[in-house]
Image (spheres, rainbow, N blue to C red):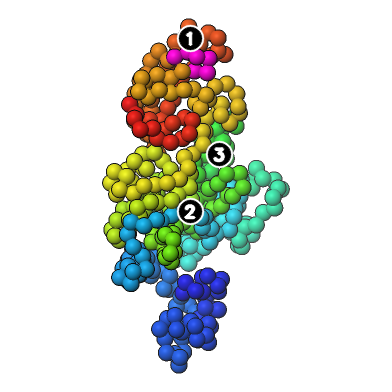
Amino acid sequence: MCAAVLLGLSDRQAAEAVRCRIDFKYAMAMELEDPGFHHSVLADFRDRLAEGDRADRLLDLVLARLKEAGLVRERTTQRTDSTHVLAAVRDLTRLELVTEAVRAALEEVAGVSPHLLDELVDEEWGLRYGRPVRLARNPTKPTTRILTAGNDAVRLLEHLYRRETGRTSGPRVQALRQIMVQNYHRDQAGRLRWRTAEKEGGPGLPPSSRAVVSPYDTSARYARHGHIISWKGFAAHLTETCAPGGPNVITDVATTAATTHDSQVLPGIHTRLARRGLLPAEHLVDAGYTSLPHLAQATREHQVTVSGPLRSNPTRQHRQNEGFARDDFHIDYDRQQVMCPQGQVSAGWHGPYTTSSPTAAPLIVARFTKSQCLALPSPHSVHLHRGQCPNCGLSPERTP
């Protein structure tokens, strides 16, 4: 069904193409008289394929056949890039999210145990949650709506807890619990309050890696790439061969949360390629994948040369072009010294220290004394990543 995806066909159109088009029958090794199948079979097929590691096993089988035919080989050149995958959910504001979560939980309970709602749901609840929520960009009485939806959710959850005697509820009710914790809090008087960002004086919101964006898919996450692309869903990392004189063949597909950094995916890609016997000699990537620890790991464990630009300097001084940034200092790894732009040589060299981030290299701290910095606006220290030249971004031959 890859052809149907490439052609942008719906399930009904794909099933019709299988019945009527010779090229589809040929691709699926079907007889010309084969009547095809009902379009609903495709949804069931996708669900079964998504279970466990069936998709990876199918890709392993395809690549094994292509390898036997000589269409794909080990130790050639491959490349990896990522793209965003939209979750099959509607884009909701926080208020819409809470309101829709209450509605989804009510529908779930009504479909399984409708008697549990007899004492709770009245005509007003029917008006508020009887249909999918859709609010204007600036809804009327937003504060009232926020407190009403929150109090209704609390009543529903407490009611279900009493009636169910603490038994585990369905996924929609569990999603409502998560959404309530992430969007509301109790003040010192025990009153329900709307969460706001810490910079606004509030208790803070959950990070994007944990924030639920839909009651219908609690694994989808919100992510932003640069200042242009933002989406709610997942990220797909595609690896393919790109050696001259041969076909481009996809050798690995990895789907992650949208908030997972690209560099964290690289070790897993190499592990799967090693299992398939298709490790590249050179792996081409963009700046998102070039984490120094993972580049060194690829060389050490798999003898793979990862080629790609290193990420730009992220410091505040570099962005605002104010003061001295890391690139303004001359670093001598052999002598373990750093020279500042005014010619002062560092008085101390400490490290390397390990960091908590899996994508960050060990940290080296070069310090200058207060007397050396009297001519500068304020005392300063420079944090360096071992093995990364501050001028060209490449790894020097000798590091401390």
Q: Position of residue 309 (x, y in %)?
A: 48, 42
Local SS, label 1: loop
Residue drawn at (33%, 69%) of the image: 70
Q: Give the Cα separation between the discs numbered 2 and 1.
A: 47 Å
Residue occupied by mark 2:
82
Residue 187 is situated, as x and y percent measured from the top left of the image, at: 53, 34
Viewer-nearest of discs 3 and 2: 2
Are the two marked residues, 1 and 3, in contact with CB atoms closer than 8 angstroms? Answer: no
C-alpha span from label 3 to label 2: 33 Å
> Mark 3: few, some, or many residues within 10 Å (few <14, many ≥20)?
some
Residue 60 falls in image quadrant: bottom left
Label 2 element class? strand
Q: Is residue 265 magenta?
A: no
Q: Determine if residue 218 is in view.
A: no
Q: Label 1, on which residue? A: 372
Residue 268 vertical position relative to residue 109 in the rendered view, above or below: above
* Residue at position x 52%, y 30% in the image: 315
The magenta stretch is 340-345
